[in-house]
Image (cartoon, rainbow, N blue to C red):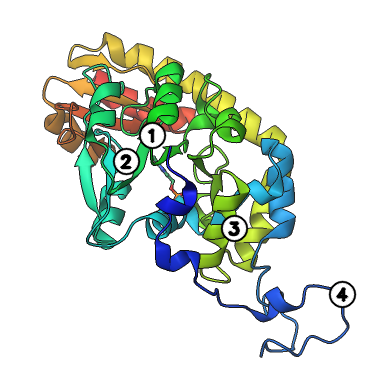
Amino acid sequence: MRAIEQLIRPELLSLKPYSSARDEFQGRADVFIDANENPFENGVNRYPDPLQRALKKRISEIKNLPEDQIFLGNGSDEVLDLIFRLFCVPGKDAVIITPPTYGMYKVLAGINNIFVKSVNLTSDFQLQHDAILKTYDRETKLLFLCSPNNPVGISLHQDTVEHIIDQFPGIVVIDEAYIDFSNQPGFMELISGKPNLIVVQTLSKAWGMAGIRLGMAFTNSYIVSALNKIKPPYNVNVLTQRRSLQGLENIGEFTKNIEIIKSEKDRVGKILATLPMVERVFDSDANFLLVKFDDCMRYFNGLKNEGIIVRDRSQQQGCAGCLRITIGTPEENDKLIKWLVK
Ligand SMILES: *Cc1c(COP(=O)(O)O)cnc(C)c1O
């Protein structure tokens, strides 16, 4: 791979970041009159910890990774946007995506004026190893992989991904939004040996906290420091830091919900596979099923009229005729099945 300093936008290497009041003084004191806050206590009158230390300590225990290798943002969307901004020069640089994949990578590229090169997944939704490496050039800074993949739910083969990380000269970002539903180990363990790897996760799915917006990047401490330098100083608000910590204490609830969702996914998948209008239920390591129907819009609209909303993914690369169905509560899943069976 190329040296990280050569991949980061040169003007950011020398950027002097904003220094907040809470960056400049972090010790204990009786009187804080340095940040123009309102002094009257209401639970949220103080600025948040810009580096989210308490929250990172807890995440560090759960993920078994040092705190200085953790970066937090306002949802994965902010984390991914900052990764674009750290590495890609607008109007010049490019990224590689592997459709079908999460739609935000392309949108963020558009917002940041970055070229997108697509190397489609194979028909069984795996990486085209050689084509990806051939598509790389000097201007290509990032490769976005999503595993388990959205919208298909299938995990990328571990050995192919490892090989690509070793051979790709730029940064490889692996989006593991669904990893906690998977029986695969994922790619966190590779971080210490691969300086060009960033793993992105979120509290929005398995942890059940989509509403508070907390995204996480795990990588080496050099990239974490560089991201800290360019992030908005107070990007993770007080309520999110507090509620995340509370949610992350409750491992019992987390594990229980995942087990229910996984067993419901098996149940729903088996039933759907027996229905005459269903042509295929794709394997899924996530909390949703991609389902191919004989006439998907008929079922999409029929379900919608019943107040059951699924996601039309039929326009996505390799997903013709497919709807994406998130696994709900057992009662919600029963409603879906009942309507389809009738
Ligand atoms: C849902 C999802 C996310 C989560 O994004 P947040 O901004 O953290 O809510 C990230 N990546 C993928 C592939 C997703 O499907």
Q: Is residue 177 left or right of residue 137?
A: right
- Figure quadrant of residue 145: top left
Q: Residue at x 69, y 74 (%)?
A: 23
Kindly indicate whether the residue at mark 3 contacts the one at mark 2 (C-beta within 8 angstroms): no
- For disc 4, the marked residue is 28
Q: Residues within 10 Å of mark 3 (few under 14, many from 20)?
A: some
Could you give the CA–CA distance between mark 1 and mark 4, rounded to whole angstroms? 42 Å
Kindly indicate whether the residue at mark 1 contacts the one at mark 2 (C-beta within 8 angstroms): yes
Figure check: 7 above or below 33 = above
Please report whichever mark, 2 or 1, sits nearer to the chain's N-terminal start. Answer: 2
Q: Residue at x 49, y 72 (%)?
A: 15
Please report whichever mark, 3 or 1, sits nearer to the chain's N-terminal start. Answer: 1
State yes or no: Cβ of the residue under disc 2 lies below 8 Å from any atom of ligand 1: yes
The N terminus appears in which quarter of the rendering?
top left
Q: Amino acid at mark 4?
A: Arg
Could you give the CA–CA distance between mark 2 and mark 1, rounded to whole angstroms? 7 Å
- For disc 1, the marked residue is 146
Q: Nearer the viewer, mark 3 or mark 1?
A: 3
Q: Amino acid at mark 3?
A: Ser
Could you give the CA–CA distance between mark 4 and mark 3, rounded to whole angstroms? 24 Å
Please report whichever mark, 2 or 3, sits nearer to the chain's N-terminal start. Answer: 2
Q: Is residue 42 left or right of residue 225?
A: right
